[in-house]
Amino acid sequence: MISDKVTKGVEKAPARSLFYAMGYTKEELERPLIGVVSAKSEIVPGHIHLDKVAEAVKAGVRMAGGTPIEIPSIGVCDGIAMGHIGMKYSLASRELIADSVETMAMAHALDGLVLVPNCDKIVPGMIMGAVRINLPTVVCSGGPMMSGLVNGEETSLSKMFEAVGARKADIIDDDQLLEFEQNVCPGCGSCSGMYTANSMNCLSEAIGIALPGNGTIPAVDSGRIRLAKHAGMAIMDLVEKDIKARDIINEKSIRNALACDMALGCSSNSVLHLLAIANEAGVELNLNIFNEFSAKVPNLCHLAPAGGTHMHDLNNAGGLMAVFSELAKKDLIDESLITATGKTVGENMKGAHVKNYDIIRPVDDPYSKTGGIAIMWGNIAQDGCVVKRSAVAPEMLKHSGPARVFNSEEEAIDAIYNGKIVDGDVVVIRYEGPKGGPGMREMLNPTSALAGMKLDKTVALITDGRFSGASRGASIGHVCPEAAAGGNIGLLCEGDIIEIDIPASSINAKVSDEEFEARRKSYVAPPPNVKSGWLARYMRNVTASSKGAVME
């Protein structure tokens, strides 16, 4: 075992003495040492309960003959970090999390890992670290939050942000806003729509590194605790069989995840995270491949923000394995691949079926024949940009309008709240990319303000930043090259006509190449937003969004 490096032999007596100092027994040190990496904290609703999940994982490890060792991880709540400097740290934290998983596992010679994340950057960050060091690994997330109830309707965090826009427009009053505040998020778990956290928890299951049910069993359901115990047992099986992270996460399993991404209508952030995971696994993945899958995989689900249903509804409809059962009818899933259960995808799917076709549409009668994510290219996104097509109103799939140009999220928010954005406009927010932000802030505040003011079906928003999975409307992000890297988005002027054609994968400004070059000669880049600290190091070393915004 790997742990023999710290537990066996005369020369390792000092290491053993330190284990004994913590109360470990000789018998425990003779068993495989399993790191249980928990993101438990008291600042993230999705993580507040992870101590219970981690304890259940540890129980499973012990039942299967291993020694669990709990290790902490940081985690940012994107909702709390939204709209201020805190959001600059969110995407950057993914790299810190990956590095910390690598550090702790390698420094202490662990034999395997059970990852206990739940929210946006923590899930991919932990997986990236595990794939990098290639240990036997199982993901067991904390599960989704139940939906809230406001005015007799199921609701979730996206409606909370939209309620702010509605209040600014005097559509609702303070009492109604408070009603949303106190009821949209009823308890622990990852926010209840198909936002980034739940997208990545589902994709963890789709890629095979998590057990069936990981993406959809609610946080408050006893099934989540049972799943955690089984995850603890599963890691011991993987250690015994020497099935490592890269045996599970490879080119073929990433393609299963891409199919799932399109069928579910996952967050646009899933593009960044799958690119980053593929990079750690040594798998070639680019934006063209995303569009290949978008063209052939139908969109089967419209969970919030695309529709009015939530993760517990998807779970009750059969969960991800039911979605796979539909995709398998069109040979869109590779059923031969090994998974964290020690069984194949096909074996995991056995008996799975859709229990409610109102939640999971039949593969022959989907919401759309194309997937929920689309990539576009054009003269303001030569290296691509991303849109969650399933959350775009039909009338906005094609749009042309004048650019309203802002150099920060704050400037755009001020204009929106003060009624300066009108029907037909194309809001452009730049210098919010991986380098320009730095950290590629989510633009949930402006998209939600537009939705709350009933402008989401008439106004588009384009940014080199990113969007929350809770954003809806024609929200086009990850514009690459970003403004801070010399991209043409930095050369747009107020009033330039922007033409958007999502079905044609096209986004262009009606500006000639000659005019762009003339503007470039007089262009003066703004000074960097940060000059010290971790974010400054991140800014110097982060790659483009088209490469997953990973660190070089």
Image (cartoon, rainbow, N blue to C red):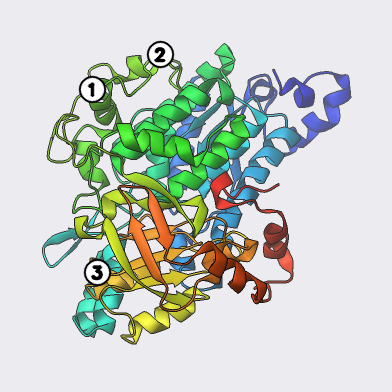
Q: CA distance from mark 1 to mark 2?
A: 16 Å
Q: Residue at x 56, y 72 (%)?
A: 85
Q: Is residue 469 above or below residue 450?
A: above
Q: Earlier in the sequence, mark 1 or mark 3?
A: 1
Camera-side residue of 528 and 512: 512
Task: In the displayed orientation, state which residue is furthest to the right.
Answer: 11
Q: Is residue 296 visible?
A: yes
Residue on which the image places disc 1: 352
The label nearer to you, 1 versus 3, is: 3
Task: In the displayed orientation, state which residue is furthest to the front.
Answer: 514
Q: CA distance from mark 2 to mark 3?
A: 45 Å
Left or right side of 540 for 315 = left
Residue on which the image places disc 3: 458
Q: Is residue 40 above or below residue 360?
A: below
Residue 430 percent coordinates (x, y): 52, 69
Left or right side of 542 for 429 = left
Local SS, label 2: loop
Q: Earlier in the sequence, mark 1 or mark 2?
A: 2
Local SS, label 1: loop
Disc sitting over residue 336 in the figure: 2
